[in-house]
Image: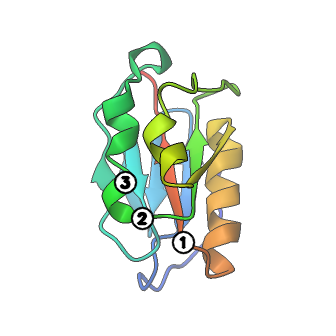
Amino acid sequence: MKLHQDSSGALNTVTGYGPDYVEVNLERHTGSIIMMPESPVTPWPVQAFDALTPELFEMLLPLNPEVVVFGSGERLRFPHPRLTAALAARRIGVEAMDFKAACRTYNILMAEGRRVAAALLLER
């Protein structure tokens, strides 16, 4: 699905997605990623929901978001609270949703000027 035809590149915006990719500012990524509006897009080294670890979510801590939109793959799945405990301890909210909804929600929150991070799981 194409979300936007153009992107200024000023802020990281999801410009398209499909079952095996996500486009950020028209650049295609075929693996899981972490992103914030004004930070470089970072590969997230996870390929399956069952492979999630606390350390993978702790990768978000240095970004200091107010909320994390977690795209759990094709369907909605909630991470066990032990996986996101470090985020909760810093009062960072985690909203779980399927991958497509996470992409759309990230764009909305980013456009509102929120300090939102997206952790998008692309399963293989």
Q: Residues within 10 Å of mark 1 (few under 14, many from 20)?
A: some
Q: Residue at x 49, y 20 (%)?
A: 49
Residues at circles 2 and 3 in contact by the CB criterion of under 8 Å: yes
Write down the residue under mark 3: 61
The Cα–Cα distance between marks 1 and 3, rounded to whole angstroms, is 12 Å
Q: Residue farthest to the front?
A: 89
The answer to whether residue 88 of the structure is visible from this angle is yes
Residue 5 lies, in percent from the top left, at 59, 73
Residues at circles 2 and 1 in contact by the CB criterion of under 8 Å: yes
Q: Which mark is residue 19?
A: none
The answer to whether residue 30 of the structure is visible from this angle is no
- Give residue 71's quadrant in the image: top right
- The amino acid on which the numbered mark 1 sits, given as a three-letter code, is Arg
- Along the line of sight, the residue nearer the viewer: 86 or 24: 86
Q: Residue at x 52, y 69 (%)?
A: 13
Write down the residue under mark 1: 115
Write down the residue under mark 2: 64
Residue 117 lies, in percent from the top left, at 50, 59
The Cα–Cα distance between marks 2 and 3, rounded to whole angstroms, is 5 Å
- The amino acid on which the numbered mark 2 sits, given as a three-letter code, is Asn
Q: Secondary structure at mark 1?
A: loop
In the figure, is residue 60 to the left or right of 72?
A: left
